[in-house]
């Protein structure tokens, strides 16, 4: 069982909200960054988070924009593609986790969807410490720009087979990376993985990727 709590991440000039789920003796902490126009209440990300909780991972679903910024963005679309800003908010979350007793010793994985994938990739390039793996679902890694070549963590791109433009962008981005990278295509799935069984398949792929790469972090935890 995991216990959920609502947290505030203080970034100095701003505060953003998140939902932290902590199973007993978590393997690691997975930080979620949602895509444009979504929020931490996204049922898709919540489904993935529940599967990860069941596998022993703590999860933190966070809104990268303040309420005021989100309101502006819904009217103007002015913020959702500001990857620099979104990546800085991801790093705020990592700093917050480092100061909290329940998460301070946990290594971190990133799960990003759509533009959130670009944000976590850029954050991982800027501050690779503690990041053991990254998963992108229906992501736009191309929006991370040149930073993607500096990512060190093993990275999984999950893309729908019926999402051809995003699939091609992911293929191109994978070629730019020097880190371990894999592209998994979910047949017949469109961008939001709304088809029967598609999201469950994506969640299973994400869980297996994090489990496959968390071993070193678990060894480090046992040795401290």
Image (cartoon, grey):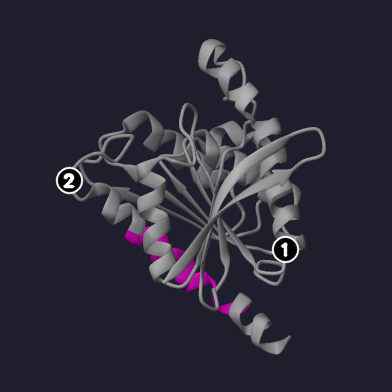
For label 2, the SS is loop
The N terminus, quarter of image: bottom left
Whole-number angstrom distance, CA of label 2 to CA of label 1: 38 Å
The x and y percentages for residue 2 are 46, 68
Residue that extends furthest to the bottom in the rendered view of this protein = 223
Q: Is residue 150 visible?
A: no
* Magenta-colored span: 204-216
Q: Position of residue 104 (x, y in %)?
A: 72, 67
The quarter of the picture where the C terminus appears is bottom right
Q: Which badge, 2 or 1, is on the more N-terminal residue?
A: 1
Which residue is depicted at the point 44% across and 64% down?
Answer: 209
- Snapshot quadrant of residue 71: top right
Q: Nearer the viewer, residue 76 or 1?
A: 1
Tell me the number on the disc at residue 100: 1
Question: Magenta part mainly helix, strand or loop?
Answer: helix
**Quick check: is 206 in the magenta stretch?**
yes
- The label nearer to you, 2 versus 1, is 1
Q: Is residue 56 above or below residue 171?
A: below
Number of marks in the rendered image: 2
- Residue 11 magenta-highlighted: no
Pick out the residue farthest to the left: 196
Task: Please indicate whether residue 211 sits to the left or right of residue 13 in the image.
Answer: left
Q: Which mark is residue 196?
A: 2
């Amino acid at each position: 069982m995991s216990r959920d709590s609502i947290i505030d991440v203080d970034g100095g000039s701003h505060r953003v909200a998140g939902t932290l789920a902590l199973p007993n003796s978590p393997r690691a902490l997975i930080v979620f960054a949602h895509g444009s126009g979504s929020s931490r209440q996204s049922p898709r990300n919540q489904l993935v988070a529940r599967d990860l909780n069941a596998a022993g991972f703590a999860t933190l679903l966070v809104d990268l924009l303040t309420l005021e910024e989100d309101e502006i963005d819904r009217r103007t679309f002015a913020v959702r593609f500001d990857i620099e800003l979104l990546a800085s908010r991801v790093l705020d979350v990592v700093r917050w986790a480092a100061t909290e007793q329940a998460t301070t010793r946990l290594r971190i994985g990133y799960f990003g969807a759509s533009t959130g994938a670009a944000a976590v990739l850029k954050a991982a390039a800027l501050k690779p410490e503690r990041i053991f793996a990254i998963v992108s679902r229906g992501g736009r890694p191309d929006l991370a720009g040149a930073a993607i070549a500096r990512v060190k963590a093993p990275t999984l791109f999950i893309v729908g087979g019926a999402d051809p433009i995003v699939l091609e962008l992911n293929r191109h981005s994978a070629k730019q990376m020097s880190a371990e990278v894999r592209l998994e295509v979910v047949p017949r799935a469109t961008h939001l993985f709304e088809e029967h069984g598609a999201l469950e398949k994506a969640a299973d792929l994400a869980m297996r990727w994090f489990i496959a790469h968390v071993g070193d972090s678990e060894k480090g935890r046992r040795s401290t």
